[in-house]
Image: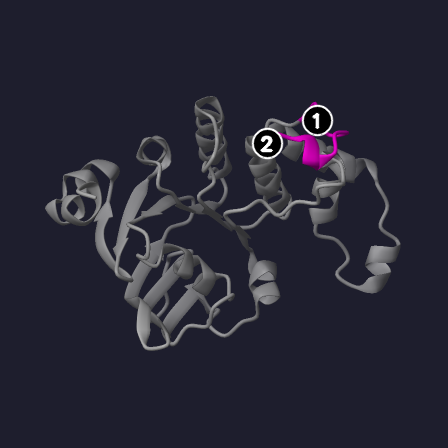
Amino acid sequence: MSSSTDFLLALESVSVSFDGFKAVDGLNLYVDKGELRVIIGPNGAGKTTVLDLICGRTRVSEGSIKFKDQEITGCKEQEIVRRGIGRKFQTPTIYEHLTVFENLELSLPRGRNVVGALFWSRTEEVKARVQEIAAMIYLPDQLGRPAETLSHGQKQWLEIGMLLIQDPELLMLDEPVAGMSVSERQKTAALLNDIIKNRSVIVIEHDMKFVESIAHRVTVLHQGKVLAEGDMQSVQANPKVKEVYLGH
């Protein structure tokens, strides 16, 4: 195993097999602090599995995952969240019957024990934090609305807000603009470019125009391995990428 790393996140020789099929195969992936990394690749390339491995949802068969130079392989999901990794899934998981304010408020980290939860109150500090996040995610005027009445795009933003309010150092988003209108996609790109001022973000996405508008670096996965990595232009010009990806 390599010694200490300066990367926020380092995956080294990571593999995972499901019934003999290697979904991720000897993967090396390094993400810097303050970086917006986009992972692309054809269906079945292992993109979502990589996020599952990082957040502890799926166990690594072999290899090492380090976050802030600490080994997190084998940690439980909640432990990984506490260390500062937030994950958004493809379908928004929000509390439909609660208001936007309540959704954000519930996501605030607070006393982790029962007593802390019992004496939780809606202080000015809490209100200010909720309003600050609501403004970032374009929902400052929607705080009193039940979440179920939001548009699809607004629900996606609310879920991003529910992660942001926990102040993770690494945020992972699985297809955040799927099903969004063009204007919602543009706003989401602006939101992500704003978010990375003090954290790193990994995005899985199929929409190439959107990827171009946000990515610092692009990693192309194919059959569980890194096929290519670099800026968007070099990746798009790569003949191997054209063959497996753009040719489809």
Quadrant of the rendered image containing residue 137: top right
Is 193 on the left-hand or right-hand side of 157? left
Which kind of residue does numbered mark 2 sit on? Gln
What colour scheme was applied to this rendering of the protein? one colour
Is 205 on the left-hand or right-hand side of 28? right
Q: Residue 206 at what x, y percent from top left? A: 35, 41
> Which quadrant holds the N terminus?
bottom left
Is 111 on the left-hand or right-hand side of 56? right
Give the magenta range: 140-151
In the image as oriented, which residue stretches furthest toward the right? 119
Secondary structure mostly seen in the magenta stretch:
loop
Q: Residue 151 at what x, y percent from top left? A: 60, 29
Q: Residue 87 at what x, y percent from top left? A: 53, 52
Quadrant of the rendered image containing residue 61: bottom left
Quadrant of the rendered image containing residue 84: bottom right
Of the numbered discs in the image, which one, if any, rests on residue 154?
Answer: 2
The Cα atoms of the two marked residues, 2 and 1, are separated by 10 Å
Is 196 on the left-hand or right-hand side of 152? left
In the image as oriented, which residue stretches furthest toward the left? 239
Q: Which residue is labeled 1 in the image? A: 142
